[in-house]
Image (cartoon, rainbow, N blue to C red):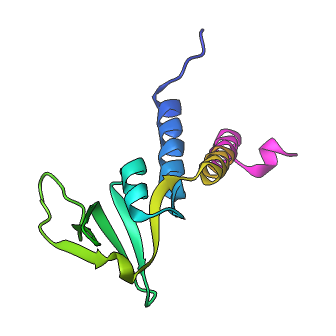
Amino acid sequence: MSVGRGPTERRRAASVLLCAHLVGCHSWHVETGAPATVLADRHPSQVRVTQLDGHRLVIYQPYLAADELEGLAHPARAYRPSRDSLCVLLSEMSGLATRRVSAGRTVLAAAGGLVGVTFLAILVTCGTYDQCFP
């Protein structure tokens, strides 16, 4: 009999990958360049602006218009287009951050998921702790 990947193994693998993605593979990275440079180089779908008073807000589909950073207050969806716009003067901004994949968090989440799934598989296979580890 050949050993292959059945539906259960595929579901486990998909669950591990989903958990790894949801745990926090993305994080905000503060940009050091000028907003115009960041928008031109990275083309981010969203940015987090820190204002001089410390207030933070996320702007979706950002673009520069004269001395302002403009965009949408909510992500636009095909079923729910957003018409709420935001604008922040560049002179009122103390920081700009973009969302990026965090390789370290992704590796840790995937490794933790694999260890957890392996441990659960051992427990399910053995039935009880005493049967596996006499």
Q: Residue furthest front?
A: 66
Question: Quick check: is 124 in the magenta stretch?
Answer: yes
- Tell me where residue 53 appears, x and y as whole percent: 43, 91
Residue sitting nearer the eye, 56 or 93? 93
Which residue does the image show at 42% across and 48% down from the upper left? Answer: 41
Q: Quadrant of the N terminus?
A: top right
Q: Going by the image, does 35 lie left or right of 116?
A: left
Which residue does the image show at 14% across and 51% down from the upper left? Answer: 78
Residue sitting nearer the eye, 4 or 131? 4
**Image quarter for residue 73?**
bottom left
- Tell me where residue 133 appears, x and y as whole percent: 84, 45
Which residue does the image show at 24% across and 75% down from the upper left? Answer: 87
Question: Quick check: is 91 in the magenta stretch?
Answer: no
> Is 1 rendered above or below residue 84?
above
Q: Going by the image, does 90 lie left or right of 126?
A: left
Q: Which residues are magenta?
A: 116-134
Which residue does the image show at 52% across and 58% down from the upper left? Answer: 24
Q: Residue furthest bottom?
A: 53
Q: Going by the image, does 104 lie left or right of 93?
A: right
- Tell me where residue 96 appears, x and y as whole percent: 45, 69
**Image quarter for residue 69?**
bottom left
Q: Residue furthest top?
A: 1
> Is 125 rendered above or below residue 54?
above
**Image quarter for residue 80?**
bottom left
- Tell me where residue 28 appears, x and y as whole percent: 50, 64
Magenta region, main secondary structure: helix
Q: Going by the image, does 18 lie left or right of 70?
A: right
Q: How many marks?
A: 0
